[in-house]
Amino acid sequence: MTTVEERLVTLDEADIRLDRWFRRHFPGMTQGGIEKLCRTGQIRVQGKRVEASTRLQPGNTIRVPPPALALADGPPERLAKPLDSRTAKDVARMVIYRDDWIIVIDKPPGLATQGGPGITKHLDGMLDGLRFGAPDRPRLVHRLDRDTSGVLLLARTPGIAGKLAAAFRTRTVQKTYWAVVNGLPVPMKGRIDLALTRTQGLGGARSAIAHASDPDATKASTEYETIDHAGRKFSWLGLYPHTGRTHQLRVHCSAIGNPILGDMAYGGESGMETVAGRLHLHARALTLPHPAGGTMSVSAALPPHMVETFKQLGFAAPAVEPARWQQE
């Protein structure tokens, strides 16, 4: 007999509607069915009755009743969305580490993490290609901007997704980004504590430095260091965010007068013809508590356009080290 389950909302599911969450996790559910279960109180969020349009936040608990769980019964092949052979090969090549609990991929620049207006190809739509025989579809536990490359973590079960989401939320995950920026920061090493807010422009929603009186301001903090520089024209920065706001690194670099190379949205004109329009921001590494115990460290190589820029500017990036899992 199928029983009630409690599921945790992960970071990548922040601000999505409850009905969309159910259709993602239980593809067989209809909109009418979801709304009926909400009306009768069988679906609850944080123990409370909710509407299907309710927006979810990371860490929320969702009561999943038997009618929904029953749709997940049966062979996993029935739930998997088949990918064409080329897409399946592309997504498999992204994998840089996997075990029974997690999968780590090296996301290429230009691939959106999730769908949105005008976005038909995205990683979320490819995750069935990363089951590797497991019954569960892997789940994103954090996000990268469409044009940001590098390390992206996936959980192989809902329970692991909840643990990893909590690790990101409590800031026990250490994130390292590399960026090439315009100019030379002064000072060359420091911490940027500037709150952010969301604004609307001609190109849609963007992040911006918040005014002190802004009620919607959210705390944002980034440490940075200059690893190398080409005179005063370009610099290679290590960026270490302590918070995970939308476009945080891009806005913070721009705010100190050193926008990221190729970041046209935040003032980072290229100045180099060969890389015009390409964002030079790379999620280099993650260090996190492994769900099975111990500490996991994994890193990703620079994307081709940043490799070329490093060569032009004389920057020497160290080789990628193999993933390390130091078990307790």
Image: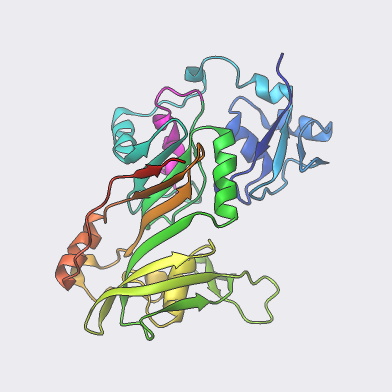
Q: Is residue 148 above or below residue 119?
A: below
Q: Is residue 34 left or right of residue 321?
A: right
Q: Is residue 122 above or below residue 3?
A: below
Q: Is residue 206 above or below residue 288?
A: below
Res 195 quadrant in image: bottom right
Highlighted magenta segment, given as a residue range? 119-135
Res 186 quadrant in image: bottom left
Image coordinates of residue 274 in percent, x first then y, are: 19, 67
Query: Between 83 and 326, which is closer to the camera in this rendering?
Result: 326
Q: Is residue 148 magenta?
A: no
Q: Is residue 59 left or right of residue 188?
A: right
Image coordinates of residue 262 in percent, x first then y, are: 32, 69
Q: Is residue 125 magenta?
A: yes
Image coordinates of residue 271 in percent, x first then y, are: 24, 76
Image coordinates of residue 199 in percent, x first then y, are: 58, 71
What residue is at 47 percent from the left and 76 percent from the top? 191
What residue is at 40 percent from the left and 60 percent from the top? 176
The N terminus, quarter of image: top right
